[in-house]
Image (cartoon, grey):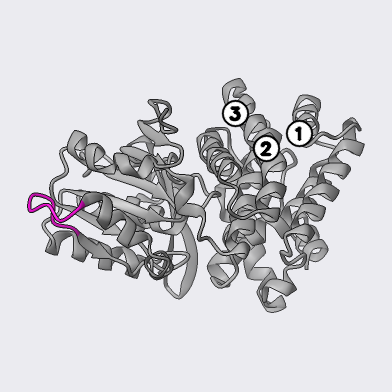
């Protein structure tokens, strides 16, 4: 019996071991005959590009242009190079193979090959979603990490610079969601231990902040609780046995479910993580979230909805209730991060103390904290920074 499953919600996808073998038929269904494969150097070095090329074969009707120059925390320059490669190849669709950085960059490329302007013209915080009006080329997202949920989300984070100010610009809107997603746990088996841990903690932070968000959305709340349960149960298994395919499959599902949950909103963890990541790109986003999340939970504990606390407690198998459950959730996140040998302080991630003020200012400009259970101001982010540093 095939282990591959096909789904239509929230977008067409194939999941399970061997799902990548569906790629050829997916391209045909989407009408893609000249795809460009966007990826990064690490994915290429791991042999995954060769795996994709082996699936597609050397058909004359589907020449593949490979663009492997996407960097972690993709910038406007990465996107511009991708746009140039897309046009040079006369491509009619994109296959994004990699983590959230690659998939986000691919979303930005499909946006700019079909719309005039720069990424900042589509800044979500400045009403950019209303400017996404033209059809975009199809995008097949194939995640090689289990964390960001970018394969189903309708947004992208791109590092931009204007007047000497570097920031993470969020572009988003329903049309930006990939056309198809392929979630194959076999593609995550070569992921280094640090990236396995950091991306899984990213998925965990999505689930917790979505549950904590006061925005009402019962569907997302149920999905986020399920995602959190999957991470808590399966991450220890994958830590012990990195080749645990069932565990890898569950983590991919959790990441995907967290991506669906962005509809409900995130929180202060992500606002501060986005700000620090723009100023110190070497710090992995998921690792930053793992450091910040326990302190944000403690900051929020008096303001969280009791139902949200109960959902987090159920998923994490916490017996306590109320603020005691929030404290225990924070402790458990720290314990999980320690067991994965992830850094526990911002300084351990190499974050310079001197960016504190600018990071806080940028966090205030980030939209994620708008759905934090407790309102945030300069003093609030200062409190979180000091606790985490």
The alpha-carbon separation of the residues under discs 1 and 3 comes to: 12 Å
Q: Would you say residue 61 sits in the magenta stretch?
A: yes
Q: Earlier in the sequence, mark 2 or mark 3?
A: 3
Q: Is residue 11 above or below residue 75?
A: above
Q: Is 337 in the magenta? A: no
Name, please, the residue furthest toward the top: 218
Task: Give the total of numbered labels.
Answer: 3
Nearer to us in this view, 97 or 377: 97
Most foreground residue, 237 or 83: 237
Q: Residue 352, image x and y in percent?
A: 68, 77
Q: Earlier in the sequence, mark 1 or mark 3?
A: 3
Q: Indicate whether 271 appears above or below 44.
A: above
**Quadrant of the rendered image containing residue 327:** top right
Give the crowd class for mark 2: few <14, some 14-19, many >=20 residues within 10 Å: many
Q: Nearer the viewer, residue 245 or 177?
A: 245
Q: Give the residue pinned by disc 1.
A: 312
Residue 233, visible in the rendered structure: yes
Residue 130 visible here: no
Looking at marks 1 and 2 on the same chain, the residue that comes earlier in the sequence is marked by 2
Quadrant of image for the N terminus: top left
Q: Residue furthest front?
A: 1
Q: Which residue is mark 3?
A: 223
Residue 27 in which image quadrant: top left
Labels 1 and 2 touching (C-beta < 8 A) = yes
Q: Residue at x 31, y 44 (%)?
A: 140
Side of 174 relative to 264 (left or right): left
Cα–Cα gap, marks 2 and 3: 9 Å
Would you name the residue on which mark 2 appears?
Answer: 228
**Rendered location of residue 143, percent (x, y):** 43, 50
């Amino acid at each position: 019996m095939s282990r591959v499953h096909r789904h239509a919600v929230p977008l067409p996808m194939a999941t399970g071991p061997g799902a990548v073998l569906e790629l050829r038929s997916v391209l045909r269904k989407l009408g893609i005959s000249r795809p460009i494969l966007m990826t990064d150097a690490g994915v290429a070095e791991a042999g995954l590009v060769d795996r994709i090329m082996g699936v597609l074969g050397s058909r004359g009707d589907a020449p593949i242009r490979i663009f492997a120059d996407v960097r972690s925390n993709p910038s406007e320059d990465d996107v511009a190079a991708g746009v140039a490669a897309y046009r040079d190849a006369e491509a009619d669709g994109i296959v994004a193979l990699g983590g959230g950085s690659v998939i986000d960059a691919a979303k930005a490329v499909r946006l700019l090959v079909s719309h005039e302007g720069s990424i900042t013209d589509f800044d979500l915080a400045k009403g950019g979603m209303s400017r996404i009006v033209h059809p975009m080329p199809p995008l097949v997202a194939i995640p090689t990490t289990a964390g960001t949920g970018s394969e189903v989300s309708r947004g992208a984070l791109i590092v931009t610079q204007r007047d000497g100010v570097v920031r993470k610009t969020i572009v988003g809107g329903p049309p930006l969601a990939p056309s198809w997603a392929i979630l194959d746990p076999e593609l995550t088996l070569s992921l280094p231990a640090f990236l396995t841990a950091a991306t899984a903690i990213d998925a965990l932070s999505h689930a917790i902040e979505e549950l904590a968000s006061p925005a009402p959305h019962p569907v997302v709340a149920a999905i986020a609780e399920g995602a959190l349960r999957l991470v808590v149960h399966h991450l220890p298994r994958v830590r012990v046995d990195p080749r645990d395919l069932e565990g890898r499959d569950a983590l991919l599902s959790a990441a995907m479910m967290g991506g669906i949950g962005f509809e409900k909103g995130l929180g202060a963890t992500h606002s501060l993580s986005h700000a620090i990541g723009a100023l110190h790109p070497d710090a992995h986003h998921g690792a930053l979230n793992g450091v910040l999340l326990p302190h944000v939970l403690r900051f929020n504990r008096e303001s969280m909805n009791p139902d949200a606390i109960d959902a987090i407690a159920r998923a994490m198998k916490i017996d306590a209730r109320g603020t005691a459950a929030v404290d225990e959730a924070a402790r458990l996140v720290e314990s999980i991060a320690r067991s994965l040998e992830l850094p526990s302080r911002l300084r351990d991630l190499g974050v310079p103390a001197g960016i504190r003020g600018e990071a806080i200012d940028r966090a205030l400009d980030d939209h994620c904290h708008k759905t934090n259970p407790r309102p945030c101001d300069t003093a609030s982010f200062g409190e979180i920074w000091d606790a985490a540093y």
